[in-house]
Amino acid sequence: MLKLSKLTDYAAVVMAQIARQPEQSYAAAELAEAVNLPHPTVSKTLKMLVRAGLLISQRGVQGGYRLARPANQITASDIIAAIEGPVAMTDCSHAGGGCDLAGSCGVADNWQRVSLAIRTLLDSVTLAHLAQTTPIKLPVQLPIQSVSLAASAEG
């Protein structure tokens, strides 16, 4: 089963909470209470999001956590990558990935297309979308048929 980790899910929940009132700075304990998650889990998640450049942290009386850029400029793939690493279906599906069977497996090109379609979809969903309480509208058809892959251009 393809599944995001709980930590990634929690990161999206925390980021959405911040995005709903982006002018406010949030303390970790305040966020933990607001989203009903344990404080240590929220603190760990916040540190990962700061390290990835999605949040900024400011110390002091007026300090706390804020979005590093507007919610409509942070994508679902940004949040996932901050916690999980690059979005890819297989090792050969992302830049720098490799596999001993890539030359003979016969499915690498198609896995790359699937990974690209998933990244395209995740790149089209912003934190602003995730923070909405109404369902978001997703594209009905993904453009994987017309995708030109670097491997295809070389071959």
Image (spheres, helix red, strand yellow):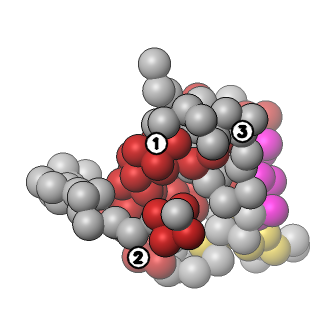
Task: Judge left or right: residue 52 versus residue 4.
Answer: right
Q: Is residue 71 above or below residue 119?
A: below
Could you say which disc has been placed on residue 126 in the image?
none
* Label 3 Cα neighbours within 10 Å, binned few <14 / some 14-19 / many ≥20: few
Q: Is residue 144 magenta?
A: no
Residue 140 lies in quadrant? bottom left
Q: Which residue is mark 3?
A: 99
Task: Judge left or right: residue 17 versus residue 49.
Answer: left
For the magenta stretch, what is the residue range? 43-51
User: Which of these two is toward me, 35 or 74?
Assistant: 74
The amino acid pointed to by label 2 is Asn
The amino acid pointed to by label 3 is Cys
- Give the x, y percent position of residue 97: 71, 49
Write the residue at 74% across / 63% down: 52
Write the residue at 87% across / 71% down: 59
User: Which of these two is toward me, 113 or 10?
Assistant: 113
Q: Which residue is mark 2?
A: 72
| Mark before the other along the chain sequence, 1 or 3 | 3
* Label 2 Cα neighbours within 10 Å, binned few <14 / some 14-19 / many ≥20: some
* Label 1 Cα neighbours within 10 Å, binned few <14 / some 14-19 / many ≥20: some
Q: Which residue is mark 1?
A: 111
